[in-house]
Amino acid sequence: MKKILVVEDNEINMYLCCRIIKSSGYEVIEARTGEEGVALALKERPDLIIMDIQLPGIDGLEATKRIRESEADGEIPIIALTSYAMAGDKKKAISVGCTSYIEKPINPDTFIAEIEKYL
Amino acid sequence: MKIQRKFQIIALLLLTAVSITCILISRSISTNIIKQQITNNLINTTQSRANHIETLLSQYEELTKTVATGVAFRDAVDESIDHTRRIEKVNQRFKNIIETHEEISRIMILNKEGIIIASSHEDTGIDKSAHEIFLKGKEGTFIGDLHLSQFTHKVVLSISAPILLNNQFAGVLVINFNVNKELFKITTDYTGLGETGEVYLVNKDGYMISPSRFIDEIFLKQKVDLRYLEHFEPSDTPPKAEIDIVKDYRGIEVLSLDIHLPKMNWCLMAQIDAKEAFAPITQLTNTLILVFVIILFIVIFISSFTSRTITRPLRILHEGTEEITKGNLDYKVGTTSPDEVGQLSRAFDEMTTNLKKSRKELEKYQEHLEKLVKERTIKLEEKTDELKGANLKLQEFDRLKSMFIASMSHELRTPLNSIIGFTGIILQGISGKITKDQRKELTMVKNSAYHLLALINDVIDVSKIETGKVELFIEEFNLADLMQEVKESFMVAANDKNLKLSLEMPERLIIKSDERRTKQVIMNLVSNAVKFTDRGEIEIKVRKEDKRVKVLVADTGIGIKKENMEKLFKQFSRIYVEGKPVTEGTGLGLYLSKKIVDLLGGQIKAESEFGKGSKFTFTFPLEYTEVKV
C-alpha cells in the first residue's frame, strides 16, 4: 500500500485529506508542523507528500527545501497546498522543489485525480 | 557738479564774454580815435614844416634875385668898368652881405662865360660853365640841390640868379646858403614829435639830405625805401597825405608820412616809432585788461555769493532728503523763502508728512496683517495637529483593515474550505449512500459555498487593489496554454447549455505579464459570456497586434441595454437580467477586471447590442512595463 505523508496544521483539513486519501486505498502519515513533516519524510520515505504552505514554525516552502537538500533521493513527489490569497505561492513552491500544487479549497471530485498523476 | 559751481561758471563765462566784447569794442574805437589823432598830429606838424621849408626857399630865392639886381653886382660884370675896382667893390659888398646874413655862407659871381670872376672865397677863375647852377641860372632864378661844399665840406644850398646889364645877360650870381642855419633847424625841430619822431628830407633819388635824429653823417648816404619815389612822378593832384606803418631805414617799425615838396622835387618824411605812437593804445589796452581782471574778481565774488544764496535752500533740501532717507520722517526742511526752491521745500515737507501718515497706516495694516497671520497660523497648526491625528487614525484604520483582510482571507476561507470539502466527500458517497433529495440539497450547499468563496476572493482583491497592496508577479508565460486552460474550465458549463465555445489563437504566444491576473480577467469575461448566453456561441479570439495582445470574447447572449453600458465597469453595479437569479455573481467581476487591466497597462472595452450579444475586448502589452494607476 502506497504511503502518503500529509503535512497540515489544520485539523479539519487534515481530516478531510485523510478521508479522501484513505477512501481511495492509500496509507496516510500525518504531520502537524514543518519540522515533523521533514523528520517523517526522511524517516518514513513516503510515496508522495502533500505539503501545506502556511504552517506554524518552518513553513511548507522551508520544509520542502530541507527535504530536497538533506535527502539523497529527490524522487518523492511533493504536492503543495496553496491558498488563493497568497499570490505567488505556486511559483515559490515549484521553485523550492515541489512537484506540483493544488489550490485550496480541496475539491474531493478532483483531488485524488491530481494526486494519482504523481503516484 | 554742484549747482553752485555750475552757476558760478555760467555767470563767469557770461560776464567774461560781455567784458571781453566791451573791451574789444572800446579798444577798437579808441585805437581808431588815437590813430586818427596821431595821424592828424603828424600831418599837421609835417605840413607846417613843409610850408615853412617852402617859404624859406622862396625867401632865399627872393633874396638871391634882389641881390642880383644890386648895383655892385651889375658893375662887377660890366666889362667896361675897371676890373680891379669893380671886384674890390663887389668883394666889399660880399663882406657886407655875409655879415648881415648869417645864413649865407658864400657868394660868387660868374661872368657870362661861366667863369668865377668874384667870390667871397678864394676861388676865382674856376670855370663853372658846365654846371647846372650856371646853365639854369642864366635863364632865371635857380635853386640847386643840396650838395657838399668843396671848401667847407658842409652841406650847402646854392641859388643862382642872372645878372642883367641894360636888360642884357651879363653874368650869374650864386649864393650858397648854410642849411644848418635855418633849413635844418626846421627839420631838426622835433617839437610835437615825441621821443622818437623825426622829420627829414629826401631828394628825388631817394637819398636822405637832412640830418637824422638817430644817425650822424647821413647826407646822401642813406637811401630810403624806393616806395616813396612814386611821389616824385609828376601828377596833377598831389597825393593825399597818408600814414603808413613801415620799417624805416633803421629797420624799426614806424608810422610814416611823406609830403612832396614840388619846388625842389623833395620829399619831406615824417616818421615816429610805432611803439611810441601807439603807446596810448597799449596803455589803454593795459588799463582795459586791468579793468577786466577787476570785473572778473568782482564777478567771481558776486556769483559765488549769489549762487550760495540760491543753492543754500537746495542744499538744505538735499540734507532734508538725506535725513528722510535715513528714516527720520519727523525732519522738516522748513524753508521760508518765497521763491521756487522755497515752494519745493514746503511741498517736500508736506510730502514727508503724508509719507509719515501713510507709513503709520501701513504699519497699522501690517500689524493687523501680522495678527491675522498669527491667528491663522495657530488655527492652521491646530488643523495640522488635527489632521496629523486623523492621519494617525487613518493609518491605524488602514492597518486594521489590512489585518482584517488578512484574517478574512485565512479565517473565512478555512471554514469554507471544509464546507466545500466535506460536502464534496458526502456527495461522492465516501461517507455512505445519500438520497436523491440529499444530493440535490448538498449540491446547493456546495454551490453556495463556492459562491461565497468567490465573493470573499473578489472582495479581498478589490480591497487590495484599492489600497494599492496588490503585488504583481511578472514573468514570461505562454498565453496559448492559459487560454487552453480557460477554455477547458468552461467546456462543461458550455456543453451543459448547449453552447458552442470556440478559441482562435496562435499556437504559441509568449508574453511577459502577471499570469494569474491575466487569467482572472479572461476567466471573468468568458464566465460572463457563458452566464448570459442561452443559445448560440461564444467566440474567443486572441491576436497579436504590434506590441500588444488583443483578447476578444464575443457571445450571442442577451446583450446589454445602452443605458446600462456606463454602469458596466462600476462596483456592485449588477444589472438585473430577467430570468436570472440575482444570487449568481458577485457584482465585482467587471469592476475588478477593469482594475486589473489598468494595473497591467491594458484597456478593456465593451460593445453590445441588446438582445443580440456582447463583445468584450481586452488589450494589454506583450511585455509589462510598470504603470502608475
Image (tube, rainbow, N blue to C red):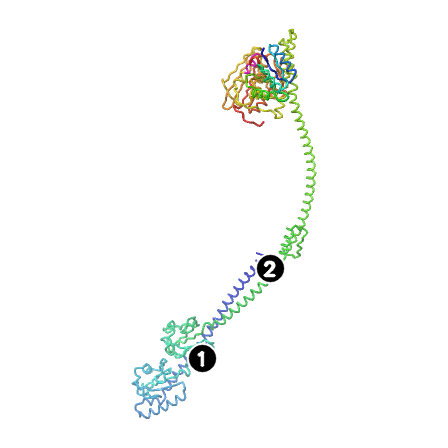
> Which callout, 1 or 2, points at the residue further toward the start of the chain?
1
**Which stretch did the figure color magenta?**
B485-492
Asked where in the image residue A68 lies, by quadrant, the reply is top right
Task: Report the chain holding disc 1.
Answer: B
Q: Is residue B489 magenta?
A: yes
Nearest to the observer: residue B431 or residue B507: B431
Q: Is residue A8 magenta?
A: no
Is the N terminus of chain B in the top left, top right, bottom left or bottom right quadrant? bottom right
Residue B253 pos. (x, y %): 43, 71
Is the C terminus of chain B in the top left, top right, bottom left or bottom right quadrant? top right
Nearest to the observer: residue B90 or residue B587: B587
Nearest to the observer: residue B367 or residue B498: B498
Would you name the residue on which mark 2 appears? B307
Residues marked 1 and 2, same chain? yes
Amino acid at the residue labelled 2: Ser
Residue B224 pos. (x, y %): 38, 74
Mark 2 lies on a secondary structure that is helix
Mark 1 lies on a secondary structure that is loop
Numbered tag placed on residue B189 in the rendering = 1
- Count of residue discs: 2
Amino acid at the residue labelled 1: Asp
Asked where in the image residue B218 lies, by quadrant, the reply is bottom left
